[in-house]
Amino acid sequence: MNFTEDKIKKLADLLLIGLTDEETKMVLDEFDIIDKNINKINEIENISEIEPMTHALDSFCYELRSDKVEESCTLEELLSNSDNNDGAAVVLPKVVG
Amino acid sequence: MNSKSIKQIHDALLNGEITSRELIDQNIKLSKEVNSKYNAFVTILEDIESKDVNENLLSGIPFAAKDNYSTKRILSTGSSNTLKDYVPFFDATAISNLYKSGAVLTSKTAMDEFGMGGTGTTAHTGITRNPWDKTRMCAGSSSGSACAVASGAVSFALGSDTGDSIRKPAAYCGIVGYKPTYGMISRYGLFPFASSLDTCGVLTRSVEDAAIVVDAMKGLDPNDMTTFDSSNMELYNNLSDNVKSKKLFYINELVEEENYPNISEEFKEHLKIFKDTLEKAKELGMSVEGVSIDKKILNALPSVYVVLSCAEATSNMSNLTGFIFGPSSDADNYIEKMKNYRTNGFSSLIKRRFIIGSYVLQKENQERYFINAQRVRRLITDIMKDFYKEYDAMIMPVGVGVAKHLDNSLDMLDESTSVLDEFLQVGNFGGFPSITIPNGFINNLPVGVNITGNCYNDQEVLNIAYALEGVMPYKNQIAREVNHE
């Protein structure tokens, strides 16, 4: 199994999440069980031929709503829950350039 | 009065026995008492305006909502430190539908962080305790809602259910938990966990109350394209205890004692209570038969759920950056800011979920984990749908015994996890309507039984539960705390 402590640390870095040693061990232990159970899935005959199910009602007929302008929130309401705004936009930390 | 049924409260409001104002004030006082004992709420509202009472059964009646429902101008945290100050500027559709019925939101309930746990111990406000026994969990993730209803603080509380998050806490707290067919209630404004499994629903003390509330919550919503038109379903008006000739099935492999070599006395008693309920079903004129499912498929189910739910959660939660919502840190650059926000804001449980979700979604791992889990999801759903060609509903015990002790609340998948303990997840895999009702006691603590039917057959599922509830003495029960002295 290639799910190692090193792999967990790399994934955590990608997710920008810091893990304690205890949390790392918990992930390892939990994943060990998942891996064994996933092995059991591969014992199911012709598993690869089954169409993956992506949604609870995958025979559902989706209808798009009509493309028309509807009433929406006011700017004041949208800004009301921000800590820092200039009256027209929320002020965020610089994330580009 | 808040401990009565919805119809009883409605009648009392109509005949002037109590006013909506008095009811709300009673509710707030009681909620505060319940909170001081069991820690069930994130927010108990003050200064709530009373509503006019009219012919609508819910008019003027207080209710609680799980804290992952967006509520306009009311704190909505998902029980996470990352959203501890978040106040939405819109209402979830289910909430606004209830407002249209005249129901009065009085509190928001604690839950496992973002709905991702099954213990009720990971809310940022602390552990929610079981009102039957404070040393035990309510289960989760709708822990606070279950506690609020079971303790009599409200007659109904909204929950959400991704694996069994309404139906397991209902069983542990001796009440009713109803997850309708996927898409019957709009998810607009519900904080997403795993979108293909997430379902809105309700916790009540009777099947009748569950039908009344879901009638008001449901409906087609242009803001949620997975909703379907259920206007032809009037669940409350069509409740009937005439279930003669209905056919029920249960899964042999999961409820036969001989399949558990090291079975505990408690679990043995639970299975006996389940068998007693089957006899009651037969007395009501229903037939009950055991059916079999390939053990390879059964044994894979808990991991299939973890893989699918973690993968979807990781994708859904990518917007939790610390910039759009929540407290931002003082770090110099955005990467450090984001890392601080996530590291300090998420509980261990959530971090584990995201690591696993991220791993199974990596290109080189997708086929083995994520795609194969989706394949097993189809297999078990097709198996269930084949059973529903012959039977009207499945009947199964909920969990393996009574509410677990809080010192056993790590919420980690372990090898001893019984497939039965997690089996209600099948209801989410297939989007099936599913309801838990109380069906007995072990050492003065409640246990539940679950009825799950085919998609869109909510009425049949409710009627079977309604009939069974009628021949058992647990309808409208309020928690009676066990004495440890």
Image (cartoon, coloured by chain):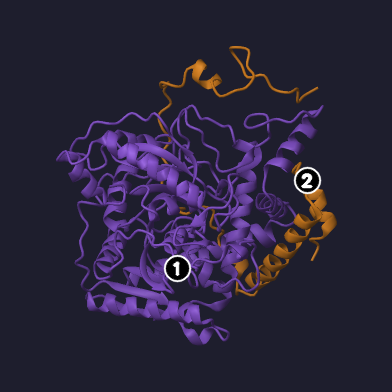
Chain colours: A orange, B purple
Query: Is B297 left or right of B384, judged from the image as shown?
Result: right
Residue B198 visible somewhere in the drawing: no
Which residue is located at x 33 percent, y 28 percent? B49
As drawn, the label of residue B362 is none
Q: From mark 2 to mark 1, how far is it between C-alphas?
A: 36 Å
Residue A7, above or below B21: below
Which residue is located at x 62 percent, y 66 percent? A48
Q: Amino acid at mark 2?
A: Gly
Query: Is B133 left or right of A36, judged from the image as shown?
Result: left
Q: Circle 1 sits on which residue? A: B398
Q: Circle 2 sits on which residue? A: A18
Residue B258, above or below B232: below
Which residue is located at x 61 percent, y 48 percent? B313
Percent coordinates x, y for residue B40 in the rendering: 49, 48
Crowd class of label 1 (few under 14; some 14 to 19; many from 20; radius 10 Å): many
Q: Quadrant of the N terminus of chain A?
A: bottom right
Residues marked 2 and 1 touching at CB (< 8 Å): no
| Numbered disc 2: secondary structure | loop
Crowd class of label 2 (few under 14; some 14 to 19; many from 20; radius 10 Å): some
Mark 2 chain: A
* Residue furthest to the top: A87
Mark 1 chain: B
Which residue is located at x 24 percent, y 46 percent? B9
Percent coordinates x, y for residue B110 in the rendering: 51, 46
Residue B84 visible somewhere in the drawing: yes
Q: Amino acid at mark 1?
A: Val
Residue B41, above or below A92: below
Percent coordinates x, y for residue B39 in the rendering: 51, 49
Query: Is B388 left or right of B366, judged from the image as shown?
Result: left
Quadrant position of residue B445: bottom left
Closer to us: B95 or B247: B95
Residue A34, above or below B85: below
